[in-house]
């Protein structure tokens, strides 16, 4: 099973990724965790990523793509993996697809965590408060200003992946505002359900509800008369508009 978890910061991807990984016996691959480890170790990647992450911006595509390319080749990822926080841009998604295709593999699905952003911010604030109370170290990017930037990076660079994966018939949206257990259950059901877009292409919808070519002669005649009346009306209004338009407006607009 090869899954991507997609959703804004604080949507609960990490929690669900752990549970999914445990259930399927496959690793959770979090680029955020890997980058934080690199920062802590002071590796060349960590040095590059540190300030970018602290600002809540995205680390350059080639850096994270190289990390993931290497990670999904490891033996523990052979049976599958849960990607948490990757891909975050269309370029990353395309690279992932290529990396998998090279080995004759593809994704099984993309879980989209649908959440209310206002509540998310409160959730993260609460999480920070709890961690502080327990005396745990708080992430450098877990503060209101940087969180705003992380959300904006999500909206601008990551949210386009929703359409991208929907078009591929891989998207499985779930309500991320429910309890942890309910979200886990919703994901389980979403993974069992056959993908509609892939298995049953939607028939083109017609207003009349009738299939093409089944209109009666009388109905066709009525339609033709209607459209003739409509175009006459349009021509009349257009003439009137020219007449009544103030002189200045009739001049071609100046460019520049
Ligand atoms: P969250 O989902 O809560 O924002 P993550 O732990 O997934 O947190 O990511 C933390 C930071 O690591 C991001 O704000 C970004 O700077 C960097 N990062 C993680 N994954 C990626 C990625 N796929 N592409 C670019 N930057 C990433």
Image (cartoon, rainbow, N blue to C red):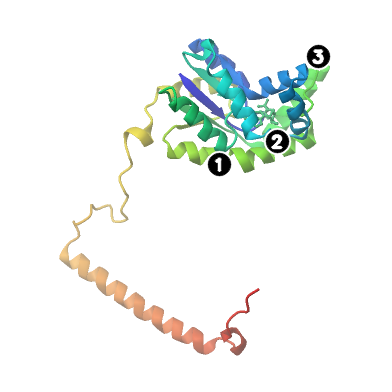
> Pointer 2: what residue?
150
For the C terminus, the image quarter is bottom right
Q: Is residue 205 visible?
A: yes
Residue 186 pos. (x, y %): 49, 24
For the N terminus, the image quarter is top left
Q: Is mark 2 within 8 Å of ligand 1?
A: yes
Contact between marks 3 and 1 (CB within 8 A): the answer is no
Residue at (56% x, 33% y) in the render: 92
Disc number placed over residue 160 in the picture, else none: 1
Mark toward the viewer: 3 or 1: 1
Crowding at dot 1, Cα within 10 Å, few <14 / some 14-19 / many 20+, comes out as some
On screen, residue 187 versus residue 68, left or right, reads: left
Mark toward the viewer: 2 or 3: 2
**Which is nearer the N-term, disc 2 or disc 1?**
2
SS type, badge 3: loop
> Disc 3 to disc 1, how far (Cα)?
37 Å
Q: Is residue 13 visible?
A: no
């Amino acid at each position: 099973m090869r899954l991507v978890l997609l959703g804004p910061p604080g949507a609960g991807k990490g929690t669900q990724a752990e549970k999914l990984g445990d259930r399927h016996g496959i690793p959770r691959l979090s680029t955020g965790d890997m980058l934080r480890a690199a920062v802590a170790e002071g590796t060349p990647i960590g040095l590059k990523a540190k300030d970018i992450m602290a600002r809540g911006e995205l680390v350059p595509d080639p850096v994270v793509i190289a990390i993931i390319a290497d990670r999904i080749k490891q033996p523990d990822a052979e049976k599958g993996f849960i990607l948490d926080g990757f891909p975050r841009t269309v370029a990353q998604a395309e690279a992932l697809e290529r990396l998998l295709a090279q080995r004759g593999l593809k994704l099984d699905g993309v879980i989209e965590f649908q959440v209310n952003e206002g509540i998310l911010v409160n959730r993260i604030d609460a999480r920070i408060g709890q961690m502080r109370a327990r005396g745990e170290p708080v992430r450098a990017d877990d503060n209101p200003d940087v969180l705003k930037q992380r959300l904006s990076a999500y909206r601008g660079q990551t949210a386009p992946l929703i359409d991208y994966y929907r078009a591929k018939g891989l998207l499985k949206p779930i309500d991320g505002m429910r309890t942890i257990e309910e979200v886990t259950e919703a994901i389980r059901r979403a993974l069992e359900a056959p993908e509609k877009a892939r298995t049953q292409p939607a028939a083109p919808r017609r207003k009349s509800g009738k299939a093409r070519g089944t209109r009666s002669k009388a109905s066709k005649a009525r339609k033709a008369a209607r459209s003739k009346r409509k175009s006459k009306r349009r021509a009349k209004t257009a003439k009137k508009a020219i007449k009544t338009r103030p002189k200045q407006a009739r001049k071609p607009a100046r460019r520049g």
